[in-house]
Image: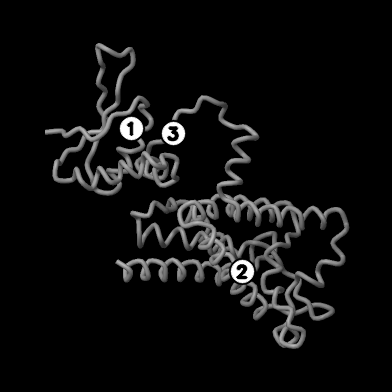
Amino acid sequence: MDHPLIAFNQQSAAHLLANYLNSQGIHSSVSESGSSQKSSSEFIVVLKDAEQTAQAELIAKDFLANPTHPKYQQAAWDSGQNVKLASSGSSFSVGELFANAVSTPFTSLIFMLCVCVYGIFKLGLFAPFPQQLLMQPFGLLAENNQWWRLLGPAFIHFSILHIVFNLLWWSMLGAKIERTFGVSMLCIVFVVSAVVSNAAQALFSEPVSSNIFLFGGLSGVVYAVMGFVWWLGWLRPQWGLSLPNSIVGFMLVWLVLGYADILWVNMANAAHTAGLITGCLLAGVLSLGSGKSK
């Protein structure tokens, strides 16, 4: 026998909640109920098992507090559906773009910094910056203490394809992490993965004139956030982070092609690999830490 849980005026909201409940092992469905006193119908989320009511009520309460959380849309995608909450406005607006930027400030900050550095580079005003951003040998860093260079290469891109590819993935995956865990966690993932990936690439590269390594890009960080989301989707699916297998497969194939040296671009293979491993390890540490705190 079905057990009513909650009713919505929007069909899409009911289906979002029902899909998420099913993803958490709580069997539910949506039924439509007309009312003689109302001109519109109600969409009721019903449970198959009354023993799961208490757990379902907690999830429903969280849903009502934040119905736009990405984990609900992710559950819909994973179930083969694509439902969104109804909106009275257009599908895209400057206001919506600004709201998204405000909701993920660190993701937006890194995005804008990369765009600004690339714009300066294309305007021909980049000459002073390599001395401050590009990586140097470790021995030289130990002498001049310019340790920010471990982060600097992440902001440098040399082609439009390079920056567009990186920023698309950063915007999608970085925002997922920031909305779920907050600014601090994404900042940790960014800093740790940037330092590790740039250091790894320096170990497998030869410096050019003035003892400077000529590599850059956000790719190491991108592989880190991919690994972070991928592994948390496996270790802690209840947290609502996950990646489709097709995307993971694409990124891993791209990584292998870089080592095969058959692409038309020079790949920072060490940075990519180090970033991926770092993201997976950070996800594992977070998962283990959460388990111990319970």
Q: Looking at the image, which residue is at 20% across and 32% down?
A: 4
Disc 2 marks which residue?
A: 194
Q: Looking at the image, which residue is at 36% across and 37% down?
A: 16
**Residue in the foreground of this view, choosing between 285 and 269:** 285
Residue 199: x, y in percent? 64, 77
> Marks 3 and 1, how far apart in space?
10 Å
The image quadrant of residue 218 is: bottom right
Up-down: is 21 above or below 152? Answer: above
The amino acid at mark 2 is Ala
Residue 235: x, y in percent? 35, 62
Disc number for residue 84: 3
> Marks 2 and 1, how far apart in space?
41 Å
Q: Identify the element where label 2 is drawn.
A: helix
Disc 1 marks which residue?
A: 14
Q: Looking at the image, which residue is at 44% across and 59% down?
A: 230
Packing grade of label 2 (10 A; few <14, some 14-19, many >=20) is many
Instruction: Looking at the image, tell me whether mark 3 or mark 1 is earlier in sequence order.
Output: 1
Residue 48: x, y in percent? 17, 38
Q: Are marks 2 and 1 in contact (CB under 8 Å)?
A: no
**Residue in the foreground of this view, choosing between 96 and 23:** 96
Packing grade of label 3 (10 A; few <14, some 14-19, many >=20) is some
Q: Which image quarter holds the N terminus?
A: top left
Q: Which image quarter holds the C terminus?
A: bottom left
Q: Which colour scheme is used?
A: one colour
The amino acid at mark 3 is Lys
The amino acid at mark 1 is Ala
Packing grade of label 1 (10 A; few <14, some 14-19, many >=20) is many
